[in-house]
Image (cartoon, rainbow, N blue to C red):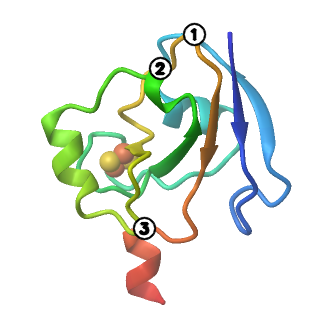
Amino acid sequence: MTRITVLPHVEICPQGAVIEAEKGQSLCEALLAHDIGIEHACAQSCACTTCHVLVRAGFDALAAADDLEEDMLDKAWGLEACSRLACQVVVADAPLTVEIPRYSINLAREN
Ligand code: FES
């Protein structure tokens, strides 16, 4: 199991959380399995960016994003150098600290 620290998000995870994820599981699956309701509008098929996360620790230990993920990330709200799509991140051995951005492209449009 790999420890994932989720930083507080005002709506999705107000207190923050520390969860244990299975190696090989996607980060999005792990969050959802622990009732952290990250958006995943395209059913985790790398087509929407609503599962955008900022990997604040452990980023360098992850397998690199492929071209499709990189292309999708360019459309994400609040893109940073440590941005990834949670549905494309495969949990490995290294603990991760992730921040869910305040907005996704869906919310940014609505607000
Ligand atoms: S759920 Fe749509 S890109 Fe991850």
- Residue 72 relative to residue 16: left or right: left
Whichever of labels 3 and 2 marks the residue nearer the N terminus, that label is 2
Whichever of labels 3 and 1 marks the residue nearer the N terminus, that label is 3
Residue tagged 3: 78
Indicate the position of residue 63 as horizontal and vertical percent values. Answer: 35, 20
Q: Quadrant of the N terminus?
A: top right
Residue 18 to residue 70: above or below: above
* Alpha carbon separation for disc pair 3 and 2: 22 Å
Indicate the position of residue 65 as horizontal and vertical percent values. Answer: 27, 32
Residue 24 to residue 28: above or below: above
Label 1: element kind? loop
Residue labelled 3 has its Cβ within 8 Å of some atom of ligand 1? no
Residue 105 to residue 109: above or below: above
Residue 54 vs residue 15, the one in the foreground = 54
Question: How packed is label 3: few (under 14 Cα within 10 Å), some, or many (20 or more)?
Answer: some
Residue type for callout 3: Gly
Whichever of labels 1 and 2 marks the residue nearer the N terminus, that label is 2
* Front tag of 1 and 2: 2
* Alpha carbon separation for disc pair 3 and 1: 27 Å
Residue tagged 2: 61
Residue in the image at 86% along x and 55% along y: 15
Residue tagged 1: 93
Question: How packed is label 2: few (under 14 Cα within 10 Å), some, or many (20 or more)?
Answer: few
- Residue ranking furthest to the bottom: 111
- The answer to the question of whether label 1 and label 2 lie on touching residues, with beta carbons closer than 8 A, is yes
Residue in the image at 68% along x and 46% along y: 36
Residue type for callout 2: Ala
Residue in the image at 37% along x and 61% along y: 79
Label 2: element kind? helix
